[in-house]
């Protein structure tokens, strides 16, 4: 027998230590459920191929993404153990995450007023060692969603902002952690700049050595589900229409394109290019998706065929690098 082979309980302990040392989140409840299942199923205290295969089987009426999450939990543990020689298990189940189809929602003014009212009312009652966490979350909650709404950031871009990425003096945000490694710069409105300055002053008193601009109680980045979880809690406090945090980005694009109505074709092109750059789009074609959805801009769309548009876009090829 390989002298590196470890029992499930030993791997459990080693994996927990590994996550602590590498500054990852502690073992979550789903991982704990998997480990407890394996311990109950094992006769000799070790992982077995049959045990893992049974866990990874899709259950009756189980949704694809629920199945994916269960398999991913097993995959993380087994990969950790296999790489260190603690076990030798094959992961035979391959499940792909299925993107849920969400209808693009135009958020109306009253819905936004209601949502930000819920943000300002939200409190996080924490005591003892968790008191600082509640204080951080309460400040972050009031500001991060306003930033998403006013500047069209992707939720992951806001969550992974570092303090050095936010230039509050000049009102600029440097987006480094983004989709497809497309770093870009976002300019803040004077109002948003003031909100962020006030937030930064208050959060420094709670977490003076933080790494993340929007931190958890340890000064690190928020958990990847935090924005979505809190958004839904606040959104449905006063609203009933379906919405997700990414709808703020969609609405940012559509509202800015709406504002182009009445401009000349060349003026509209320059403005559209600026919107595209601020959103970190790889090409103008991605921004044109919103352009086609904007009813207030249909008058220009009707005048402008695709044949007309291409010469305008290609006529100024070097202009894209100026933004």
Image (spheres, rainbow, N blue to C red):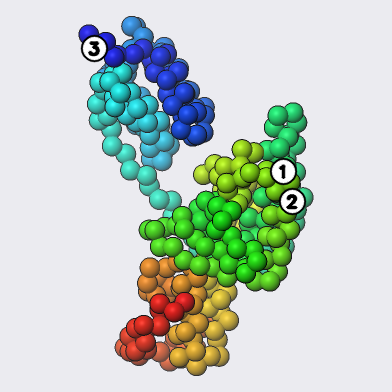
- Residue occupying image coordinates x 73% and y 58%: 198
Q: Secondary structure at mark 1?
A: helix
In the image, residue 18 sits, relative to residue 194, either above or below, namely above
* Dot 1 or dot 3, earlier in sequence: 3
Q: Residues within 10 Å of mark 1 (few under 14, many from 20)?
A: some
Which of the two residues, 163 or 225, is positioned nearer the viewer here? 163
Q: Quadrant of the N terminus?
A: top left
In the image, residue 143 sits, relative to residue 265, either above or below, namely above
Which of the two residues, 295 or 306, is positioned nearer the viewer here? 306
User: Residue 130, position in %: x, y?
Assistant: 69, 32
Q: Which residue is mark 2?
A: 202
User: Residue 136, position in %: x, y?
Assistant: 69, 44
Q: Which residue is mark 1?
A: 206
Farthest residue toward the top? 44
Answer with the quarter of the image where residue 273 lies. Answer: bottom left
Q: Using the numbered discs, state the Cα–Cα distance from disc 2 to disc 1 in whole angstroms.
A: 7 Å
Q: Which residue is mark 3?
A: 2
């Amino acid at each position: 027998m390989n002298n590196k082979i470890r029992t499930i309980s030993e791997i459990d302990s080693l994996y927990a230590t590994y996550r602590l040392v590498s500054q990852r989140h502690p073992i979550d409840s789903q991982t704990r459920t998997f480990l407890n299942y394996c311990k109950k199923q094992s006769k000799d205290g070790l992982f077995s191929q049959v045990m893992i295969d049974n866990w990874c089987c899709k259950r009756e009426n189980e949704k694809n993404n629920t199945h994916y999450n269960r398999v991913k939990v097993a995959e993380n543990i087994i990969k950790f153990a296999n790489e260190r020689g603690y076990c030798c298990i094959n992961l035979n189940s391959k499940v792909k995450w299925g993107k849920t189809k969400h209808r693009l929602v135009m958020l109306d003014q009253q819905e936004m007023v209601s949502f930000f009212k819920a943000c300002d009312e939200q409190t996080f009652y924490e005591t003892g060692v968790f008191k600082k966490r509640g204080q951080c979350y309460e400040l972050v909650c009031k500001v991060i969603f306003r930033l998403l709404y006013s500047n069209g950031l992707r939720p992951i871009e806001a969550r992974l902002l570092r303090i050095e990425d936010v230039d509050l003096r000049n009102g600029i945000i440097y987006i480094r952690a983004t989709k497809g490694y497309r770093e870009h710069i976002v300019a803040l409105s004077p109002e948003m700049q003031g909100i962020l300055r006030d937030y930064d002053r208050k959060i420094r008193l709670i977490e003076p050595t933080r790494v993340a601009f929007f931190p958890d109680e340890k000064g690190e980045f928020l958990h990847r589900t935090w924005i979505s979880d809190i958004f839904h809690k606040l959104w449905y406090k006063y609203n009933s229409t379906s919405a997700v945090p990414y709808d703020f980005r969609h609405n940012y694009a559509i509202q800015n394109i709406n504002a182009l109505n009445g401009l000349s074709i060349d003026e509209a092109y320059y403005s559209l290019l600026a919107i595209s750059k601020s959103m970190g789009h790889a090409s103008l074609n991605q921004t044109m998706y919103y352009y086609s959805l904007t009813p207030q801009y249909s008058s220009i769309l009707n005048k402008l065929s695709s044949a007309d548009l291409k010469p305008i876009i290609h006529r100024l090829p070097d202009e894209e690098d100026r933004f």
